[in-house]
Image (tube, rainbow, N blue to C red):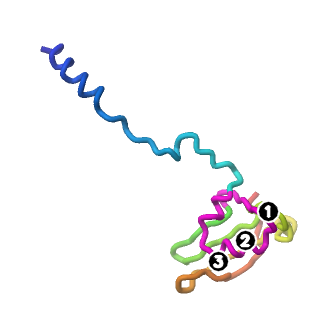
Amino acid sequence: MKVHILMLALPILLSSELPAVSKSSIGHNDGPWNSDHIDSLPPEVRQYIAGICRGPASAQHDFATYSPREKRWRINLEYLRCNGIGAFRRGNQCLDVDFVEQGSRFHVGAKQFRDCGF
């Protein structure tokens, strides 16, 4: 009887589908510097970055953080890499730029030098 059950169960197990695996999780290499960290930001923030960079830019994970409660993006320029960047650091302090949501757009709310995170 056990052999009969196993013989019925085996084809069912072999024909069942394997779980789907996301393509992005296989071999996805999100290096420390990635332009995708900029590309997913609101247009106003991307325009600001384009204005201070002279060419392609890349950023680390901690480059931009969003606070839904405050409806605010904080851009940590020490995690940005591009041509033209450099005037945004004073000793151990780095410039952070806050973009605050007003209506359907984001505007610069504050610029402040804070202790660098690296």
Q: Is residue 44 above or below residue 102?
A: above
Q: Residues within 10 Å of mark 3 (few under 14, many from 20)?
A: some
Residue 68 shown left or right of residue 94 in the figure: left
Q: The magenta stretch spans which residues?
A: 35-62
Residue holding disc 3 = 44
Residue holding disc 2 = 49
Q: Is residue 105 above or below residue 68?
A: below
Residue holding disc 1 = 82
Q: Is residue 108 above or below residue 75?
A: below
Q: Residues within 10 Å of mark 1 (few under 14, many from 20)?
A: some
Question: What is the secondary structure assignment of the residue under circle 1?
Answer: loop
Give the Cα separation between the discs numbered 3 and 2.
Answer: 9 Å
| The C terminus - image quarter | bottom right
Which residue is drawn at the image coordinates 36% and 35% (left, top)? 18
Q: Amino acid at mark 3?
A: Glu
Q: Earlier in the sequence, mark 2 or mark 1?
A: 2
Residue 104 percent location from the top left of the image: 53, 82
Quadrant of residue 105 within the rendered picture = bottom right
Asked if the stretch drawn in magenta spans residue 33, the answer is no
Q: Earlier in the sequence, mark 3 or mark 2?
A: 3
Residue 1 shown left or right of residue 83 in the figure: left
**In front here: 67 or 30?**
30
